[in-house]
Image: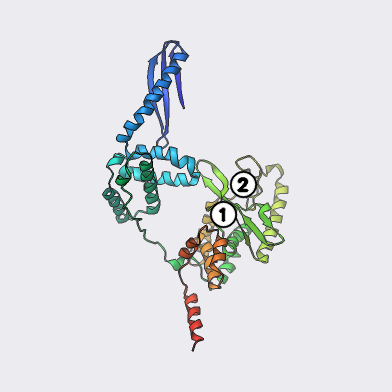
């Protein structure tokens, strides 16, 4: 947005042309002081100043640094088209990328420079390589699209995706079918809402944001089904917000009757607490200001944050003596268990909310020792 201010009445004015914010959130604007005999003339000069700035943008492209172009990419592509949490991830990667590429002219960055960057990152043992790769890929894609560089000079064309060292083995990402009974026994020592949250991840294969996004009107108490259509997310810019699921795919899952009974009793106790709190109870409202009755809220009506699940799970794992598996690993445990029981992969894909079955196949292509034994037993029958 452009504007002007009067410095000396009907004589001198300062013109401002806004260019958004840089990667660190600092305001970028161009200014000029002019002489004018009134606001009408000042406005005319402001429009001329704006046109000069626009005309100079092409010349600026010739000398655009990685940092300045990344700022433009954020403003004109990322922020208008991506959700807030994704933009924040990009911004985090950009802070690190700017330390390396920031002052280099974007036209001068070659494939070798990027390969060298990732080699240095791997040698230093730094993570988030996938996020940095995706950020660079998108930035140079739009540098081509906006005619800042040519398609032939895109340095990312021949850069392969860097391989990060896996911190845990595939087996450590989930509990096996044999471990699940012990896991469930340990989970019963948790607080009621924590216990139910864990069971929804195990029996429903739900992500933590999807669990916290369950509304009471999405539960069908008679059919033991829950409709998953939203995910609760927290961002620095927007705070707690209900958004679509990760893949924008709505789905309905059926859970065991015993778990639904646990949820029903928990919900009943929540309603009693709400009545006792009276005016102190403040229900969650969506971005339109409408009340949304979430299943998991504290006594004052405030939703539990996704990171609070991670926190209680880490403490639980430490004191329980169970194998070090993160909370998301319960979702993997659910899928792996269903696979070991012979459930159709297409049904598992639908239950997990994967848009493409290739995702499901790639993620659960591992074979547990139990599955391998079952395969051997099948061949034993031939003898």
127 or 58, which lies in front?
A: 58
Q: Residue 13 sits in which quadrant?
A: top left
**Of callouts 2 and 1, the N-terminal one:** 1
Q: As rendered, which of 76 and 334 lies closer to the eye?
A: 76
Residue 320 percent across, percent down from the top left: 53, 65
Residue 38: which disc? none
Residue at the spot x=44%, y=41% of the render? 77
Q: Residue furthest bottom?
A: 383
Q: Nearer the viewer, mark 2 or mark 1?
A: 1
SS at badge 1 = loop
Question: Is the residue 347 above or below the residue 372 in the image?
Answer: above
Is residue 132 left or right of 361 when viewed as pictured? Answer: left
Q: Is residue 363 visible?
A: yes
The residue carrying mark 2 is: 302
Please tell me how crowded label 1 is: few (under 14), some (14-19), or many (20+) other residues with Cα within 10 Å.
Answer: some
Please tell me whether residue 175 is drawn above or below residue 193 in the rendered image.
below
Reading the image, the residue beneath label 1 is: 249
Q: CA distance from mark 2 to mark 1?
A: 26 Å
Q: Residue at x 33, y 49 (%)?
A: 156
In this rendering, position of residue 374 left or right of residue 101: right
């Amino acid at each position: 947005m452009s504007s002007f201010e009067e410095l000396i009445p009907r004589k001198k004015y300062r013109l401002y042309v806004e260019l958004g914010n840089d990667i660190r959130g600092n305001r970028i604007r161009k200014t000029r002081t002019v002489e004018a005999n009134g606001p009408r003339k000042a406005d005319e000069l402001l429009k001329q100043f704006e046109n000069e700035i626009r005309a100079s943008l092409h010349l600026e492209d010739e000398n655009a640094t990685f940092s300045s172009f990344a700022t433009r990419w954020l403003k004109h592509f990322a922020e208008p088209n991506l959700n807030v949490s994704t933009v924040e991830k990009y911004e985090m990667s950009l802070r690190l990328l700017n330390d390396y590429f920031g002052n280099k002219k974007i036209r001068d960055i070659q494939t070798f420079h990027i390969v060298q960057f990732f080699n240095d990152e791997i040698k230093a043992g730094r993570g988030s390589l996938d996020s940095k790769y995706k950020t660079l890929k998108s930035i140079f894609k739009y540098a081509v699209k906006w005619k800042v560089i040519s398609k032939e000079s895109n340095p990312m064309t021949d850069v392969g995706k860097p391989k990060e060292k896996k911190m845990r083995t595939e087996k450590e990402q989930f509990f096996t079918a044999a471990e699940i009974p012990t896991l469930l026994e340990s989970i019963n020592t948790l607080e009621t809402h924590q216990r139910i949250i864990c069971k929804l991840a195990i029996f429903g294969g739900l992500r933590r944001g999807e669990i916290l996004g369950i509304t009471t009107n999405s539960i069908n108490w008679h059919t033991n089904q829950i409709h998953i259509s939203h995910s609760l997310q927290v961002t620095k810019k927007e705070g707690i917000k209900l958004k679509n699921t990760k893949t924008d795919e709505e789905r309905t899952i059926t859970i065991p009757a015993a778990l639904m009974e646990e949820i029903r009793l928990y919900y009943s106790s929540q309603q009693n607490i709400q009545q006792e709190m009276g005016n102190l109870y403040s229900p969650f409202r969506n971005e339109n200001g409408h009340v949304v009755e979430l299943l998991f809220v504290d006594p004052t009506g405030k939703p539990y944050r996704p990171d609070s699940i991670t926190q209680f799970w880490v403490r639980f794992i430490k004191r329980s003596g169970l194998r070090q598996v993160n909370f998301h690993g319960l979702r993997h445990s659910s899928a792996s268990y269903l696979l070991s029981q012979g459930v159709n992969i297409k049904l598992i894909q639908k239950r997990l909310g994967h848009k493409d079955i290739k995702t499901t196949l790639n993620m659960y292509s591992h074979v547990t020792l139990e599955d391998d034994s079952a395969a051997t037993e099948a061949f034993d029958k031939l003898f």
